[in-house]
Amino acid sequence: MAIKLGVVMDPISAINYKKDSTLAMLWEAAARGWELFYFEQKGLYLHDGVAYGVTRDLKVFHDDQKWFELGDEKVIVLSDLDVLLMRKDPPFDLEYIYATYILESAQRDGVFIVNKPQALRDANEKFFATCFPQCCPPTLVTRNMKLLRLFYEEHGDIVCKPLEAMGGASIFRVQKNDVNSAVIFETLTHNETQYMMAQKYIPEIVKGDKRILLINGEPIPYALARIPGEADWRGNLAVGAEGIAQPLSERDLWICKQVGPVLREKGLYFAGVDVIGDYLTEVNVTSPTCIRELDSQCDLNISAKIMDCIQAHITSATTKA
């Protein structure tokens, strides 16, 4: 019997065909003969304690002019699925959290949710890295302006970022004697009403912000070093950085050994850790990317490893039942 796989994602019509990691996963699932069901977050709902979703049958193609085809809308009970991929991009807001509650109800009814809904709520992508202080640069999470100024004075060159954004959005580098430091702190904390993160600037960013993908706690042996362009210091593909694959260093592997078992324990089956120089800066768990770049540069099939993990879980659960 074919596995029934659902995916919750942003509109598939608007994805970047050349780079989208979710599309790579769907290609692999389709190649295995799995049935695909497409959801957007707005289509999830709960009725009398049962999780439902407005869905459309999905077909995917290796064609940059027509990469998908959708069937007619219908409503299904989510427990009719074997597995559901939660691949909705941030912002990680209250609507996202409510969606994880609905998915958690489906999980209780036997659906394998990737990643685990509770873990998505627990593991804020910026904040979660602080669970591994032995891996991180000096880091402060606060909304207190006085503490931010003291941290800035101590380190002289810092990076400031909101806790809920992605793709390099609203990230500031504040260097020594920056006359805009106060307004940056005010903006990111919304005048001391919201938490933000500050980290010591890591000069090795010029060599790339490395994305390392882990499947069930085990790292892919290559990282994608996202090297900033001439016009922007940030190592994010979304703002123009160039992605160059490279083997994991000994330090990268050590960081993965610290983080991997915790990811596995929490049910974060597919995650991406970000490493600059020798330091862990973020742990991405909502919709990690860079599959396509690593696949093409290193002759890999990362999605196959993800689907193998999913298939093994479903087979194990069926055997136990």
Image (cartoon, rainbow, N blue to C red):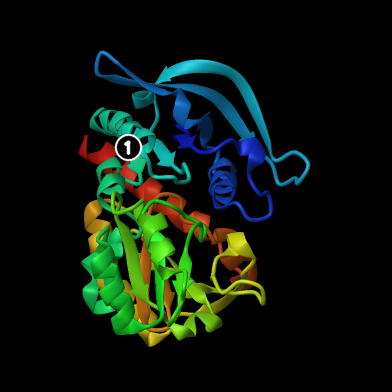
Is residue 217 toward the left or the right of residue 6 in the image?
left
Circle 1 residue: 97
Image quadrant where residue 225 sits: bottom right
Closest to the observer: 139 or 191?
191
Residue at 27%, 48% (x, y): give it. 119
Is residue 152 toward the left or the right of residue 170 in the image?
left
Question: Compared with residue 183, is residue 176 higher up or lower down, i.e. above or below?
Answer: below
Question: Compared with residue 117, is residue 223 higher up or lower down, i.e. above or below?
Answer: below
Closest to the observer: 282 or 142?
142
Residue 221 visible? The answer is no
Closest to the observer: 247 or 235?
235
Residue 160 on image: x %, y %: 40, 66
Residue 300 on image: x %, y %: 56, 66
Residue 319 on image: x %, y %: 26, 40
The kind of secondary structure element at disc 1 is: helix
The C terminus is located in which quarter?
Answer: top left
Residue at 25%, 49% (x, y): give it. 122
Residue at 61%, 37% (x, y): give it. 12
Farthest residue in the right direction?
Answer: 65
